[in-house]
Amino acid sequence: MSIWQLTKAFWKHLSNQRKRQFVALLFLIVLASFAEVLSLGAVLPFLGVIAQPDKVFAHPAIQPLLGLLGIEAPHELLLPMTVIFIVAALLAGAVRLLLLRFSTKLSYGMGADFSHDIYRHTLYQPYAVHLARNSSEIISGVTNKVSIIISNLLTPVLTLISSAFVLIAILAALLAIDLWMSLTAFIGFGAIYGVIIFVTRRRLAAISVRLSQESTKIVRVLQEGLGGIRDVLIDGTQETYCRQYRQADIPLRDAQASSVIIGTAPRFTAEALGMSFIAILAYFLTSKDSGVANTITLLGVLALGAQRLLPVLQQGYQSVVQLRSGQYSLQDALDLLNQPIDYVVHESNADLLFQRAIELRDLGFRYVPESPQVLLDLNLYIPRGSRTGFIGATGSGKSTLLDIIMGLLSPTEGGLWVDDMRVTTATQRAWQRRIAHVPQAIYLSDASITENIAFGLPVDEIDLNRVRSAAQQAQIADYIEALPERYETHVGERGVRLSGGQRQRIGIARALYKQAEVIIFDEATSALDNETERAVMDAIDGLGRDLTILMIAHRLSTLQRCDRIVELSRGRIVRTGTYDEMVGHTIHPVQSSNTQQEPNT
């Protein structure tokens, strides 16, 4: 997308409040332009009073002011003209400061809005979308590339608009003083920046691509190195990750440096040429019969005008460079901002009762149309309150099946039914409100035990009695009560201060705090030693029979307390039975999807 298209696309995402603030900013920009004209216009009479007070005193346009101030001699003009010039200069400076503050606050406020929207749109994406993504792209988009929205879009656009208004105002004032001199100066300076923009456009496009790619690489290297720090330390691969980081960081810094150089260098060229232009003009003016006084006055106005004109041109040019160098990163950020949210799913108020059973009917699934079937023709009846275990080799489809039962993935064939009501887009959230999940690796934030059990809730909304009750049911209350800070104990990043069994029990307590009716354990004990696994399984076994439990395990022995065990192979149910029957290799036929009773085991 072109810069103009990107700007329009981001404008559509602005709130009405931000758009009103932008209109207010335009008013302030116009005010700043008038202040610039006023300060520049005050220069001519001020210098005239210094160089030719008699001529200024005799000018018809100034007679009403002389009468108002009671000035009767040319030398009396110096003080009021000095005051007027100082007031005009101070006013222009004050308005410029106000404009800087307002525009900077607005651009960073818009950036905060965009960052929140990108994060929100990302969190609301379906689970299948998250599976297909690299998290480093998302983190880079929410952090680095949102910063680029501020520095390479919002600030440059606001600066361009401000520069355009101020430039027009200054140019109009200079043209009114001396048409040909001002026009020649403006065309000369403008040509310098125009040629540089034309020459560097391809270089800036290449820089833009590198900035976008390398910033994502850096986040990925940091995630991989720090995320697997135990293996990195054991294997001694620190230098490998340092080298990867350096290989991504050096091109990024080089691109940033090139962008700064391209954006800054023309200023010095323009200043040098501007001084040369004023020197040449002084030579020709003094050779005429206009007089030294007129020459000094005119040169003073031109010098002050150039002093205002050149920074404005430089700001405008630098804004163009920033826009071009951030173009590809802006496109990445816009793609994240444009992610659709299915509000039917997330804002549905539909209810879904679970009183009898969960049922899979002719269920099949594949991740993309071109990929092979992951699940094929599954029919399964799971009564409420039962304990059902799932076993099978890696890649047999166990985790995918439970993802479908949890409403994270939608079946591509057949369907999921709860009490004869199909789980659809309209009822997905209602069903998920009845489910809790305990994965193999429990995610624990660097917060208190209370906050981790009531995960995702603001501290002031946590029910402490429910937290204690959930901890008791998960058989971790005694351990917590023995800690010095008890439930306020911080667990460290990813729960590093807890053992594996303690982390799993907190995961169980978290599921119980939710007061879900279905708890799904996805290999929740596979990383534990036998003794810890038995303790955790005792905690699971002690849960009330009002809970429906679904459990994946690698070891058949882990599932010996389940009412029924389902074995999957290559996406199909190959046999079902009790633990004793599975050990004895008794195979039961898969029941028809039309049956509304639990199959015999």
Image (spheres, rainbow, N blue to C red):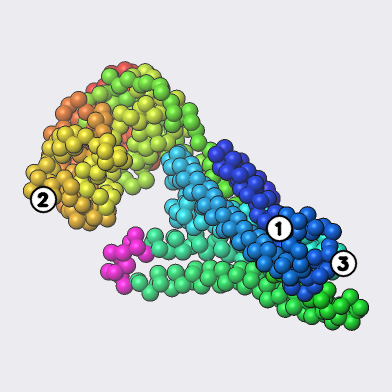
Q: Earlier in the sequence, mark 3 or mark 2?
A: 3
**Residue tagged 3:** 180
What secondary structure is found at the residue carrying circle 1?
Answer: helix
Using the image, tell me which numbered label, if any, was put on residue 407.
none
Q: Nearer the viewer, residue 542 or 96?
A: 96
Q: Amino acid at mark 3?
A: Trp
Residue 42 in the image: state x and y as whole percent: 72, 62
Looking at the image, can residue 254 be seen? yes
**Residue tagged 1:** 69
Label 2 or label 1, whichever lies nearer to me, is 1
Figure check: 249 above or below 551: below
Label 3 or label 2, whichever lies nearer to me, is 3
Q: Amino acid at mark 1?
A: Leu
**Residue tagged 2:** 483
Residue sitting at 53 percent across and 42 percent down? Answer: 339
Q: Tell me how far mark 3 sits from mark 1, CA to CA.
A: 35 Å
Label 3 or label 1, whichever lies nearer to me, is 1
What secondary structure is found at the residue carrying circle 3?
Answer: helix
